[in-house]
Image (tube, rainbow, N blue to C red):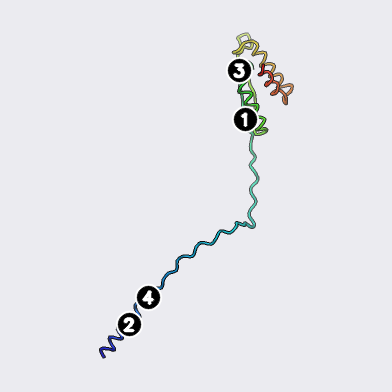
Amino acid sequence: MRRIIALAAILTACNAYQVPTPVPPPAPPPAPSPLVLLNEPALPPPLSIQPVRVELFVMSRCPYCAGVESAMLEALREAGRAVDFSLDYVGNFDPDGTLRSMHGDSEVIGDLAQVCAARLAPQRFLAMIVCQNSD
């Protein structure tokens, strides 16, 4: 009887003990498939962009201004309508109302010529300024 009880105890112990089943390694992730989006919402319309305001203050006979104008005019050709450009002039009035400029009377005349060209031929006055600056 002791053998039966011992055998029963061994069988019970064997049934209680379960051999762990090996866990398979995780499956590799699936290969990426080409992304296909169906019924994707349309992109929003492009934003309305306001032109950037650029104001250049110059003196017609100033060698530094001439260099800046030439560089600015080249940039304006590339930027097109993305820039709202204005050219303004630096000068003073004497107490009697006479215009004065840092580089003398010839600069006042050059400034006035450029202002007149801008008013009379706005599409071509920048070319005139480049020509004047080469003098």
Q: Amino acid at mark 1?
A: Arg
Identify which residue is drawn at 56% across, 58% down.
32
Q: Of label 1 and label 2, which has the lower sequence position?
A: 2
Q: Position of residue 120 (x, y in %)?
A: 74, 21
Residue 12, label in figure? 2
Between disc 3 and disc 4, the foreground one is: 4
Outermost residue toward the left in this view: 2
Q: Of label 3 and label 1, which has the lower sequence position?
A: 1
Instruction: Tell whether label 2 touches label 4 (CB within 8 Å).
Output: no
Between disc 1 and disc 2, the foreground one is: 2
Residue 45, above or below 38: above
What secondary structure is found at the residue carrying circle 4?
Answer: loop
Q: Amino acid at mark 2?
A: Thr
Instruction: Tell whether label 2 touches label 3 (CB within 8 Å).
Output: no
- Quarter of the C terminus within the rendering: top right
Outermost residue toward the right in this view: 120
Q: Position of residue 102 (x, y in %)?
A: 59, 13
In the picture provided, is 63 more to the left or to the right than 13? right
Residue 63, label in figure? 3
Instruction: Tell whether label 4 touches label 3 (CB within 8 Å).
Output: no
Between marks 1 and 2, how big is the CA–CA gap? 91 Å
What secondary structure is found at the residue carrying circle 3?
Answer: helix
Residue 92, above or below 37: above
Q: Of label 1 and label 4, which has the lower sequence position?
A: 4
Between marks 1 and 4, how big is the CA–CA gap? 80 Å
Disc 2: CA contacts within 10 A as few (<14), some (14-19) or many (>=20):
few
Q: Position of residue 31 (x, y in %)?
A: 55, 60
